[in-house]
Image (cartoon, rainbow, N blue to C red):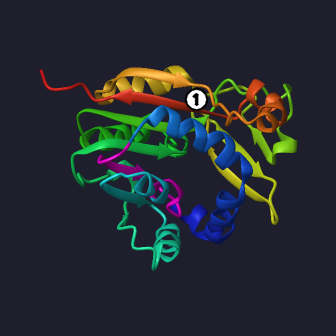
Amino acid sequence: MAMQYDKISDAYSKAANQFVFKRVVECYTVLKVLGSVEGKSVLDVACGDGYYARLLRQRGAARVVGVDVSEQMIKAARERDAGAELGVEYRVHDAADLPVLGSFDRVTAAYLLNYASTREQMLRMCQGMFANLAPGGRLVAVLPNADFDPPGPSSVKYGIVMRPPEDRKEGGATTLDLLVDPPISIRFFYWSRSTHEQVLAEAGFGDIHWHPLECSPEPEHVEFWRDYLGNQHSIALSCRKPPLA
């Protein structure tokens, strides 16, 4: 995964910050599910160029740490933050071998678990995030929607083409194309909802919920994104580390 993003870091960073979907649909949903972060500590795993890390700091989080396996993405994050004095900490770490960086109130993970090539690797990712959460803390993740229907309403007009494996085999290779200039092709792995739920529970998480993506309520957005919302390529998930007895 590091090599993939080291190669496309500049193009991906540009696309993520200009992609309307990111702001109007994905980000809107993540912030709604996450709730207020005022005064809270947040660990952003697979932070990329710091899109969510910066946003959460601007929304009042007391401490934000962003980690990513790609040195180039962390470099891009630090360069974007240069001079802004946001105080976000960025570190290079593989999420499957994540050290304990603190006891955080929230952990966010946008498009992380889909890069696990095996169930065991996904479990290590989840265990690392669990270890970094304070008791009662929540994980909010975004991941590809296992129920996406390729013959369904097309997402091409939204700049997204996803090609899940035809047999829906656990761990099967999947490709996502972002139709930006130049186009970006991203490779990851298919995992069912049940596998995610089982692995998260094995890592210690409870209160697991799936959250279909929504769009910001402006009428022009609702109408434009209607087809996408009927056949979403991504979905949000939340779960909790049990509080101390």
Question: Does 140 sit above or below residue 56?
Answer: above
The residue at which mark 1 appears reads as: 170
Q: Specify whether residue 89 is painted magenta.
A: no
Q: Residue furthest front?
A: 218
**Most foreground residue, 191 or 89:** 89
Q: What residue sits 76% from the left and 50% below the top? A: 177
Which image quarter: residue 130? Answer: top left
Q: Secondary structure at mark 1?
A: loop
Quadrant where the N terminus sits is bottom right
- Residue 97 location, x and y as percent? 33, 52
Q: Residue furthest bottom?
A: 83
- Residue 198 location, x and y as percent? 41, 22
Q: Amino acid at mark 1?
A: Glu
Quadrant where the C terminus sits is top left
Q: Is residue 111 left or right of residue 87?
A: right
Question: Does 211 sit above or below residue 159?
Answer: above
- Residue 172 location, x and y as percent? 63, 36
Q: What residue sits 83% from the left and 29% below the top? A: 227
Q: Is residue 96 left or right of residue 111?
A: left
Which image quarter: residue 53? Answer: bottom left
Q: What residue sits 86% from the left and 34% below the top? A: 154
* Residue interval drawn in magenta: 37-53
